[in-house]
Image (cartoon, rainbow, N blue to C red):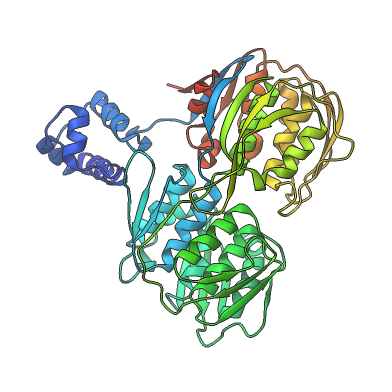
Amino acid sequence: MSEDYKGRIGNLIRDARKHRGLTQQQLADRLSTSQSAINRIEKGHQNLSLEMLARIGSALDSEIVALGAGPTHLRVTGPTTLSGTIEVKTSKNAGVALLCASLLNRGRTTLRKVARIEEVNRLLEVLDSLGVQTRWLNDDNDLEIVPPAELRLDAIDEEAARRTRSVIMFLGPLLHRSERFELPYAGGCNLGTRTVEPHMSALRPFGLEVKATEGSYHAQVDQKIVPGRPIVLTERGDTVTENALMAAALHPGTTVIRNASSNYMVQDLCFFLQRLGVEVEGIGTTTLTVTGRSTIDVDVDYAPSEDPIEAMSLLAAAIVTGSSITIERVPIEFLEIELALLEEMGFHYTRSEEYVARNGHTRLVDLTTHPSVLHAPLDKIHPMPFPGLNIDNLPFFAVIAAVAQGQTLLHDWVYENRAIYLTDLTKLGGQVKLLDPHRVMIEGPSSFTGTEMMCPPALRPAVVLLLAMLAAKGTSVLRSTYVIHRGYEDLAERLNQLGAQIETFRDI
């Protein structure tokens, strides 16, 4: 092992240890070695066997020292009947928004039970490169964020930034911190120009101008410009609304945002801003009135609510496998339309009385599913902005419709081409016909049969295929599943706790 490699590996191990919030002594205890040995390893003064690297990787729960390892795949043995109880984890999209919003605060931000997913890991790498100190506090995934006096915007980790879709949400909080800055983003110029425009129309009233070139947003701020009239969003997007909210939070006047999204992650961001001392009125409606502060410097402790999309994933898993499971901490106000539609299709379930999430606002219930014979709905299934059926929940109705009697039309009017990935269900024996880039016709009931296939590049359709594999006869393999880890924490392991047989493996 050359000195150069040993030093680089030592740095990787040190960073992974700090990311887990462990001291050298605590890591030494996990490995049954001494603190001085860990110190030598991290300084690059120690030869390491592959076995020792694997043990360190396991102790740190980190892929970072699985050197040269290829992509992970999932092998599913079906058909499965699930049973038991599972708790919904906190919202991925809220966690991502709150990480971006932590840049508004010059004090210490503590976020409770943060979704430990790849998207969050990439954002933490970006924050760390800006000089922000982040550390996991415990096994409950509580996360502490402490900003520096001045952000190092010129030192941003480009590779990590290009691997997250959320970096555009740095525009709102950063426009008050610097008159000029650059943000790297994934994808080429055309996509950048198209996706940045709704954000631009939301942020121009705060003096921000952005040019999207090949791979970078070049931002320039005229701090004399402040909103003079209500900001009308050209699309009722979640991230666009969040960007406008974060920009308004550090503007000491009052900002009115119309056509705002009132979706679950936007509401969590609003509740968080209120904890920072920002006045936000109209939460849950499409008109938000924000009275910001010129500086925010408070120690804040906040617990984001549970994830309605994960709750829907677990519901779909129970439905397609004909299983009875109890799903705890379901954010019912963001699933009421989905459940009403499922009831119309013949789905039976029982639910507890409502109780309040840790954020003090969101309504939760526990749901118990019952094996049900489903039929196709009378009308097409299509998403709408909240309080309609959530766009991210639409794909789950493809696999549900595939086990229901009759024809179901799914209309995904929001995304170009995402519906195409749902036709992959045909490889497992489903009958899914693509009518155009936005619509599929599904004929049921299907009996799924195991097969081997590549994971599609879209998160929800990838999970839909995994759920179909649970119900399929025989063995299925889903290859290159990084996209699932981007949006779900330990999904395979958690389904296994309910009785699924899913094995994670790599090609040697």
Of residues 417 and 467, the one drawn nearer to the viewer in this rendering:
467
- Relative horizontal placement of residue 126, taking residue 267 as reference (left or right): left
What is the quadrant of residue 208 in the picture? bottom right
Give the image location of residue 500, x and y in percent.
55, 19
Residue 159 visible at all: no
- Indicate the quadrant containing the N terminus: top left, top right, bottom left or bottom right: top left
Residue 173 visible at all: yes
Which residue appears farthest toward the right when viewing the image? 378
- Indicate the quadrant containing the C terminus: top left, top right, bottom left or bottom right: top left
What is the quadrant of residue 319 in the picture? top right
Q: Is residue 482 above or below residue 105?
A: above
Q: Which residue is pictured at 54% across the width and 37% down the height?
A: 88
Which residue appears farthest toward the top when viewing the image? 474
Give the image location of residue 131, x and y in percent.
32, 62
Q: How many marks on residues?
A: 0
Q: Is residue 106 above or below residue 310?
A: below
- Relative horizontal placement of residue 362, taking residue 237 as reference (left or right): left
- Relative horizontal placement of residue 380, taking residue 303 as reference (left or right): right
Which residue appears farthest toward the bottom when viewing the image? 224
Of residues 338 and 52, the one drawn nearer to the viewer in this rendering:
338
Q: Is residue 262 above or below residue 477?
A: below
Of residues 123 and 310, the one drawn nearer to the viewer in this rendering:
310
Give the image location of residue 60, x and y in percent.
30, 35
- Relative horizontal placement of residue 454, taking residue 442 as reference (left or right): left
Q: Which residue is pictured at 78% across the width and 26% down the height?
A: 402
